[in-house]
Amino acid sequence: MRKFAALVPLSAVLLVAACQSGGTPEEGGETTSAPATVETAPPVLDPAVAASVSFELPAQMTENTTVPFPYLLGYEHTSWSYDIGAEGLGPDDRIFVTSYLMPEGTTYPDYESSLAFIREYDALIVNDAHEASHNPALINRQEGIFRFAVLRIGERTLYQRNFFLFNENHVVQVTCQWENTRAILIPFCEEMQETLTLK
């Protein structure tokens, strides 16, 4: 079982998203927008307040500390980046896991309040997917939200399936990202998420 540090002690795990299909017209209605501008993220979270998040890494999937998640929101965080050693994948075809510690007192009691956080991420990346391309989802018996994303980077287009978990002021985001290799990457994402556990 592969384990990594998360953000805050978790007494009751609520939300993380299930695997949905991505990269089709049904998932991401396209509009015109400018490429995202990414600002410098704050320092990583003090490990003294870390809890535990664990999952089993599929074969051919390894952590790469030299390729950080490039789309971090401006909150205390810990983030992990994973290479997938399957033939045909490029450097941007990868999986990221990010844990955020939100300001004290922040809570997400319902779907709409959770969407407010997701819309912050949409604004950061200038998400070109249809604004309604989100839905409740389940993974490993945990409830969450799925959000599809389309990123325009010059003449290139990246796609993301983002899955968000909320517990009090702790937010976990799983990002499965690809350019032209959805069919290769998605099975790795699904296999990893089937074992994802927060405790």
Image: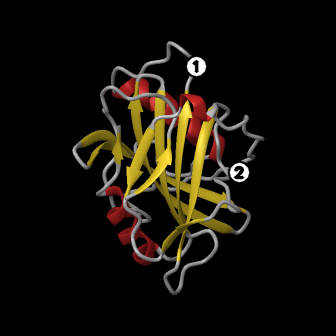
Q: Is residue 65 above or below residue 198?
A: below
Foreground: disc 2 or disc 1 = 1
Count of marks overlaid on the render: 2
**Label 1: how many Cα within 10 Å (few below 14, some 14–19, many 20+):** few
- Name, please, the residue furthest toward the right: 40
Q: Nearer the viewer, residue 30 or 9?
A: 9
Residue at image coords 61%, 57% = 151
Instruction: Name the residue tied to disc 1.
Output: 103
What amino acid is at disc 1? Pro
**Label 2: how many Cα within 10 Å (few below 14, some 14–19, many 20+):** few
Residue at image coords 37%, 59% = 1
SS at mark 1?
Answer: loop
What amino acid is at disc 2? Ala
Residue at image coords 33%, 65% = 191
**Residue 31 appears at what percent x and percent y?**
56, 52
Q: Nearer the viewer, residue 93 or 3?
A: 3
Instruction: Name the residue tied to disc 2.
Output: 34
Q: Nearer the viewer, residue 181 or 76?
A: 76
- Name, please, the residue furthest toward the top: 105
